[in-house]
């Protein structure tokens, strides 16, 4: 796994978290740190998983040149609880928090975009260090490295429409098209706004940043966990 930043470079502050509770799965997500989002069978397990993923997420913050808060579960402050849905139980942090619709300043938008871009770079680093064939899961399933990358890129093509972008999902090997799609996503995320969804039936930028970064990091960490090189 990529080395986490040194503890001395982290600051101890409370981290605002929301809880999304489905019937079978619960997510705990840090509101101001897109991609720092983990799940468990109940709220306690979700918060424990979020805390345990802190050192991994610190790598993303360091990649974005942002100071990351120190502390374990006691530093996580649950500020909102949301009812989940079948999507939550399927394994997706699907619900939009009330705080996601607050006005977004230029500084805040730039920060969100920088963390999403850092998540992509972390994925690139992980993929470069991983073998093409990954260890299978306990039941013999799981995509290999390149299939995971293709899945992530394909999902971003679908996410783009939720942010008002009408670019198709690029082929995974078309690096120029992948870069163009991601730059278009960043252009939307880094724009200040009143906080409303970007398009009708679409996403506010805060949620869009969190959903994109969560999906990228969820699979980056999967590759790490299933890599013989780890």
Image (cartoon, rainbow, N blue to C red):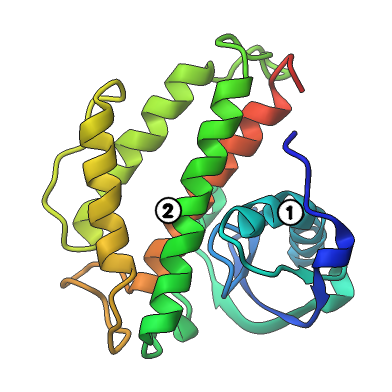
Can you say whether 140 is above or below 167 in the image?
above
For the point 82% across and 54% down, the residue is 52
Q: Is residue 49 left or right of residue 117?
A: right
With 66 as the anchor, is 165 left or right in this view? left
Can residue 152 be seen here? The reply is yes
Residue extending farthest left: 166
Is residue 94 in view?
Answer: no
In the drawing, what numbered circle is on residue 41?
1
How far from the left and from the top, in percent, is residue 147?
44, 20
Eye-nearest disc, 2 or 1: 2
On-image quarter of the C terminus: top right
Vertical position of residue 99 compared to residue 178: above or below: below
- Dot 2 or dot 1: first in sequence order is 1
On the rendered structure, is 65 left or right of 6? left
Where does residue 216 sit, x and y in percent of width and height? 49, 44
- Location of residue 154 with respect to 8 vertically, above or below: above
Q: Which residue is mark 2?
A: 212
Residue at image position (33%, 67%) is 189
Q: For the residue carrying disc 2, how many other residues have a C-alpha within 10 Å: few (<14), some (14-19), or many (20+)?
A: many
Residue at image position (57%, 74%) is 31
Up the image or down, 220 lies above or below 134; here it is: below
**If the image is split into quadrants, where does the N terminus sit?**
top right
Residue 87 at what x, y percent from top left?
46, 53
Count of numbered tags: 2
- Tell me which residue sits at (65%, 12%) in the image: 140
């Amino acid at each position: 796994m990529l080395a986490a930043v040194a503890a001395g470079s982290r600051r101890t502050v409370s981290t605002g978290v929301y809880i999304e509770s489905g019937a079978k799965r619960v997510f705990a997500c840090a509101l101001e740190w897109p991609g720092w989002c983990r799940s468990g069978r109940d709220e306690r397990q979700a918060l424990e998983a979020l805390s345990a993923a802190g050192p991994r997420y610190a790598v993303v913050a360091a990649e974005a040149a942002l100071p990351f808060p120190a502390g374990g579960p006691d530093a996580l402050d649950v500020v909102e609880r949301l009812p989940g849905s079948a999507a939550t139980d399927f394994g997706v942090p699907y619900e939009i928090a009330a705080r996601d619709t607050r006005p977004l300043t230029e500084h805040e938008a730039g920060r969100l975009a920088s963390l999403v871009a850092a998540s992509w770079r972390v994925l690139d680093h992980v993929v470069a260090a991983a073998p093409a064939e990954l260890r299978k899961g306990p039941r013999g399933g799981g995509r290999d490295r390149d299939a995971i990358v293709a899945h992530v890129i394909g999902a971003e093509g679908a996410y783009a429409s939720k942010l008002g972008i009408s670019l198709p999902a690029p082929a995974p090997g078309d690096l120029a098209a992948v870069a163009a799609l991601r730059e278009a996503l960043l252009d939307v995320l880094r724009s200040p706004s009143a906080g409303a969804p970007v398009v009708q039936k679409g996403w506010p930028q805060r949620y869009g940043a969190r959903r994109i970064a969560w999906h990228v990091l969820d699979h980056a960490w999967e590759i790490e966990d299933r890599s013989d090189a780890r």
